[in-house]
Amino acid sequence: MASSFSKQSFNKAFTTVANSVYLMLMAGWLTLLAALPLTICFLARIPVTYYPTYAAALALSAPGFAALFAIFRDQPTFNSRDAALRIKLADDHANDPDFPPDWIAAPYVPSDRSVAIIKPFFRAYARNFLRSLAIGFSFALLTFAFGYDIQITQQFTWGAALMPVLLVCIVLFLQAYFVGLVIVVEYPKAKWFSIMKSAVLLSIRRWAALLIAIVVMIGFVWGVMWNPLLVLFLGTGLIMYIEYSAARWQAQILFAQMARESGDKRIRDMYSVGADAKPRRKSSFWRGGADVMQ
């Protein structure tokens, strides 16, 4: 009896690990395909001094990253607590046509498909294409503008004093790019300006996540420059999962505020907001969570 139980436990653990490795690798490969402009830049080892090329590639790659984040959000094999809560609530209220509400994205991955990824990925790509492209172009343009400012200010003796400030702004905009895509995936009715504003503000909040994302991305870029094929094809999925987790944790501030303001216990449960949590006083910082829909 004990031997049979141990064998079942081993088989379950092995299947979970194998599925997770497969999905992580497949997620990375699909992202390399969907973010082809950025992939080409890395494979060609284009110098960072050609930053306009990277800015354009980053903008065009936004729908691919949005599709990847949709998979990370709802793929049950990754054992995400948020995904598990969404699956349970969706199953419990399967006969309720009003849940989840239309301002929250329905699950991108079927709850009964433990290794589904290819079709859900491209469905999410199509669903979020225009909105993610708009956010991608906006933040890529800001990144290019500040990169150009660095190039211009270096022609003056006082330019070195502005270098740290401009670099910090570029880093914040790059993280806001990913936070904005997390919001796009979560809220299908969110408006462009509200996403941009929220993404910038959220990228400043929970600065520990920003530091983690910076370190991980610097390590990833260094690895790509060292051995692009090895790092891109084996490490992209894992690195982007870490980036997604950091951006999602920053965006969780907004998600919790929206859940509080909804007044729906099911939505509060979806975002792990306690029953005793009350909507915070509206301030000039947020002007209420519902502002993201306006």
Image (spheres, rainbow, N blue to C red):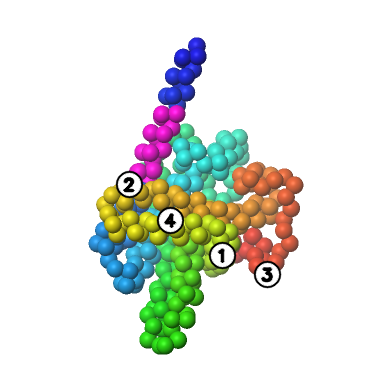
Judged from this view, the residue extending furthest toward the bottom is 156
For the residues labelled 2 and 1, the Cα–Cα distance comes to: 30 Å
User: In the rendered view, would you say 257 is above or below 82?
Assistant: below
Q: Between disc 2 and disc 3, whose residue precedes? A: 2
Q: What kind of residue is marked 4? A: Val
Q: Earlier in the sequence, mark 4 or mark 2?
A: 4
Q: Residues within 10 Å of mark 4 (few under 14, many from 20)?
A: some
Q: In terms of secondary structure, what is the magenta stretch mainly?
A: helix
Q: Which callout, 3 or 4, points at the residue further toward the start of the chain?
A: 4
Q: Which residues are magenta?
A: 13-27
Residue designated by label 4: 216
Q: Which mark is residue 75?
A: none
- Say whether residue 25 is magenta: yes
First of labels 1, 3 by sequence position: 1
**Is 31 part of what is drawn in magenta?**
no
Instruction: Sort mark 3 into few (<14), some (14-19) or many (20+) by Cα contacts within 10 Å.
Output: few
Q: Which mark is residue 204?
A: 1
Q: In the structure shown, which secondary structural element does the residue marked by tag 2 occupy?
A: helix
Q: Secondary structure beneath disc 3? A: loop
Q: Visible in this render: residue 87?
A: yes
* Mark-to-mark CA distance, 4 and 2: 15 Å
Residue at the spot 27% in from the left edge and 54% down from the top edge: 227
Tell me the residue that label 3 is attached to. Answer: 284
Between label 4 and label 2, give the one nearer the viewer.
Answer: 4
Q: Nearer the viewer, mark 3 or mark 4?
A: 4
The residue under the point 44% across, 24% down is 10
Badge 2 amino acid: Leu
Label 2, label 3: how many angstroms apart (C-alpha)?
A: 44 Å
